């Protein structure tokens, strides 16, 4: 307990292991605010589903709550399409109408699990033309006209190119929650 008190009082340096499984774009602001308040706290950043951590940022379906966690935000998932696609002429879409489209999807990622849930609700598995571990690569593949993807509206931000467009998905309502959690027994 004396060690924790001296760290909290800003008298001793400490490292927090932060596992970042979702919403990486939120991380710089979170860390900057924390470092301003607690300058002696350092962070070790991980991106590993099986890692041991002090804090973890992850995402779930809207109706799923995590133990030992705090909800950070909820966000809509949009459909990102190339501007050359006929889909770019619409402002809303039903996910069931996309059964024959080529999708570009994240591989081995929580967002992949969440999006697959919505496809299952529509009764089909998407035709996956490309997979990548990198959200940046996913964005570039959509902009290049090689497929469409589910796009987290806030954490991935607006499309910064005229080569792609975001479309609202009206059925089913596609959303996810972003949580910060800690191991059981943590504070």
Image (cartoon, rainbow, N blue to C red):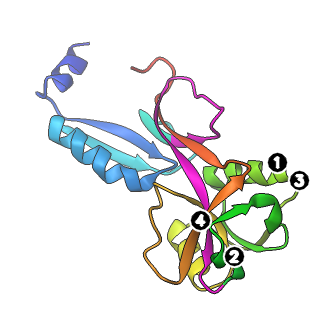
Distance of label 2 from label 3 (alpha carbons) = 21 Å
Q: Nearer the viewer, residue 148 or 70?
A: 148
Q: Quadrant of residue 152?
A: bottom right
Q: Is residue 39 visible?
A: no
Is residue 8 shown in magenta? no
Kindly indicate the quadrant of the structure image that contains residue 11. Answer: top left
Q: What whole-number distance in Å separates the C-alpha atoms at marks 2 and 4?
A: 25 Å
* 107 over 47 or under it: above or below: below
Picture residue at 13% right of the left edge, 28% below the top: 10
The residue that mark 2 highlights is: 87
Dot 4 falls on a residue whose secondary structure is loop
Distance between the alpha carbons at the discs numbered 2 and 1: 21 Å
Do the residues under discs 1 and 4 have CB atoms within 8 angstroms? no
* Part of the protein shown in magenta: 58-84
Q: Are marks 2 and 1 in contact (CB under 8 Å)?
A: no
In the image, is 7 to the left or to the right of 154? left
Mark identifier at residue 121: 1
Q: Which mark is residue 123?
A: 3
Residue in the picture at 29% in, 38% down: 15
Q: Secondary structure at mark 3?
A: loop
Which residue is situated farthest in the left direction here? Answer: 11
Residue shown at 42%/35% (left/top)?
Answer: 55
The 10 Å Cα crowd at callout 2, few under 14, some 14 to 19, many 20 or more, is: some
Which quadrant of the figure contains the N terminus? top left
How packed mark 3 is, by other alpha carbons closer than 10 Å (few <14, some 14-19, many 20 or more), is few
- Is residue 65 positioned above or below 36 on the image? above
Q: Quadrant of the C terminus?
A: top left
| Quadrant in the rendering for residue 12 | top left
Q: Earlier in the sequence, mark 1 or mark 4?
A: 1
Please tell me which of labels 2 and 3 falls first in the chain.
Answer: 2
């Amino acid at each position: 307990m004396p060690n924790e008190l001296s760290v909290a009082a800003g008298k001793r340096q400490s490292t927090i292991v932060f596992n970042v499984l979702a919403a990486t774009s939120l991380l710089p602001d979170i860390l900057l605010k924390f470092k301003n308040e607690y300058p002696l706290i350092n962070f070790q950043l991980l991106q590993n589903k099986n890692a041991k951590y002090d804090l973890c940022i992850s995402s779930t379906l809207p109706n799923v709550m995590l133990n030992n966690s705090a909800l950070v935000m909820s966000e809509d998932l949009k459909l990102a399409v190339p501007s050359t696609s006929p889909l770019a002429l619409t402002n809303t879409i039903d996910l069931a109408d996309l059964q024959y489209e080529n999708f570009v999807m994240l591989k081995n990622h929580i967002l992949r699990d969440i999006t697959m849930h919505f496809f299952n609700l529509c009764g089909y598995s998407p035709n996956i033309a490309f997979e990548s571990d990198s959200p940046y690569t996913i964005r570039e593949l959509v902009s290049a006209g090689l497929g469409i993807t589910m796009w987290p509206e806030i954490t991935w931000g607006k499309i910064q190119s005229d080569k792609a467009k975001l479309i609202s998905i009206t059925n089913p309502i596609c959303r996810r929650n972003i949580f910060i959690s800690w191991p059981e027994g943590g504070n």
